[in-house]
Every structure is written in C-alpha cells, then in structure tokens.
Image: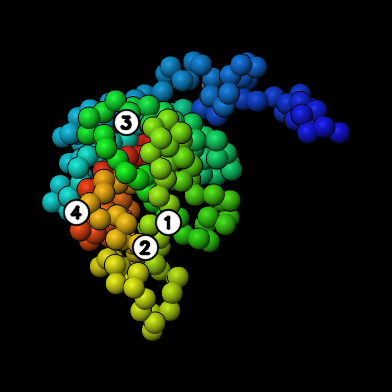
Amino acid sequence: MKLSFINALIGLLYPSVCAACGSSLFKWEKLVCTRCRNLLPKTGYEMNEDNPLARMFYGKVRLKAVTACFFFSKEGKVQHLIHELKYKGNGDAGIFLGQELGKSLKEAPLFQGLDYLIPVPLHPKRERQRGYNQSQMIAQGISEVTGIPVGDKFLFRSVNTATQTHKTKEERWQNVKDIFAVKHPERLEGKYVLLVDDVLTTGATLEACALTLSAVPGINISCATAACAG
Ligand SMILES: [Zn+2]
C-alpha cells in the first residue's frame, strides 16, 4: 500500500481537527482553522520596548527586548495549542506558533539584525519523553518565516550532564545558578541572539538563560515566547 493511501485512510478514520478549538478542519485548512487564525489574541508587544514583559527583567538581566506573540488565557485557544505542543506530541503546533511569532518579529525594529535563535534547552530526560523540545519547534517556526538560523547547540542544561570533578572549558561558563551553560561562547561574541521559549510566566528560566549568555563578550540578547499571561 502506498503511504499516501494510508494517510488518506487515516484522514477518513480520524478527521483533522483544529489544534486551537477542536472543530473539524476543511480540506484546505492545516492544523489551525481560519477562524482561530483570525481570533488568536496577539500582544503587539514586539513594537513596544517598555512593555510589561520587558519590565519583568529590569534590574535582573540586561535584555534588548522582550515579547510574546499571544496572550495566554485559561481554557483559551492559545492554551489549547500549547497543551497540544507540550502534552499531546503535536510538534506542528509549535511550528505554527513559531511562524506566527516570526511574522510579528519580521517587521519589528527591535528584533532586526538577529544572528541566532536560541531555544531554551529542555532537560534531556524530558526531551526523550516528549520526543522533541517544544522551544526548538517554536524556534524552527520562527526560522521558517524569518530565515534566521536556529542555534540549538550553544545553550545546554549543565545539571546532571558532567561530573563536577572534571571541569571542562564549557563549565567555566556556568552561571551562579548552575542550570545552564554555554558551548562555543567565542562564536557568540558580538552577536545578537533571541532566546525562545513556549510560555513566559515568572521569567525565571529565561532570566537564568540570559544571565548565562550575558557572560559572552559583546552579546546582545532578546527574548520571545509564543504566549504570556493576558
Ligand atoms: Zn479553530
């Protein structure tokens, strides 16, 4: 049997539904229905340097800009998409969110001249369970729209990765919290990077990542997530 035939059969047995609202999709709709695409609540924060998300990091770590694509509200469509991405193995939901984020960043002056998109690394054990890192899927979506490369080898979780007795070159870059570390810091010197995560809540993870990256000479850092509290 041809794979396309099997796919068609699966389509008949399990009709595609919108990853945001759960209603059936038309043949020409992919992943998210047209209605949801038009209704998802955009923040517009990418155009506002002094937005509430940027203020969360004031006095903690120096960031060029902070934004989230959508407002995240309980039982809402954005929550549903994030849930699909994190708990239902729907990596395409991350690509979609990333593409939407990428579209908003593309025209935003604060986010011009980016050299790399750096996804917040997931704990390797969690990544194995999920099959992917959700932040990486979002970064991939942004990259598809903007052409900015994903630099997913620069930042990694240092906890449980190396024995502390043998300090490597990379480990010298560990921040005070010892959660994240930078690989190949020399390649990030003088670069402008965008930290990418799924949801911005307390900002603690992004802060730890940004603090670690900020040890690199001449680096400029901005943060973007798919969603934030609304
Ligand atoms: Zn929908």
How far apart marks 3 and 4 lie (CA) works out to 22 Å
At 32% from the left and 31% from the top, the residue drawn is 105
Tell me whether the residue at label 1 lies in contact with that at label 4, contact meaning CB atoms closer than 8 angstroms: no
At 52% from the left and 40% from the top, the residue drawn is 85
87 w.r.t. 121: above or below: above
Per the image, the residue denoted by label 2 is: 183
Which circle marks residue 153 in the picture? Answer: 1
Mark 2 lies on a secondary structure that is loop
Query: Does the beta carbon at disc 3 come under 8 Å from ligand 1?
Result: no
Among the two numbered marks 3 and 4 on one chain, the one whose residue lies closer to the N terminus: 3
At 37% from the left and 44% from the top, the residue drawn is 117
Per the image, the residue denoted by label 4 is: 218
Q: Identity of the amino acid at label 4?
A: Gly
Q: In the depicted view, which residue is nearer to us: 90 or 21? A: 90
Mark 3 lies on a secondary structure that is helix
Per the image, the residue denoted by label 3 is: 105
Among the two numbered marks 1 and 4 on one chain, the one whose residue lies closer to the N terminus: 1
The quarter of the picture where the N terminus appears is top right
Q: Does 130 sit left or right of 163 as displayed?
A: right
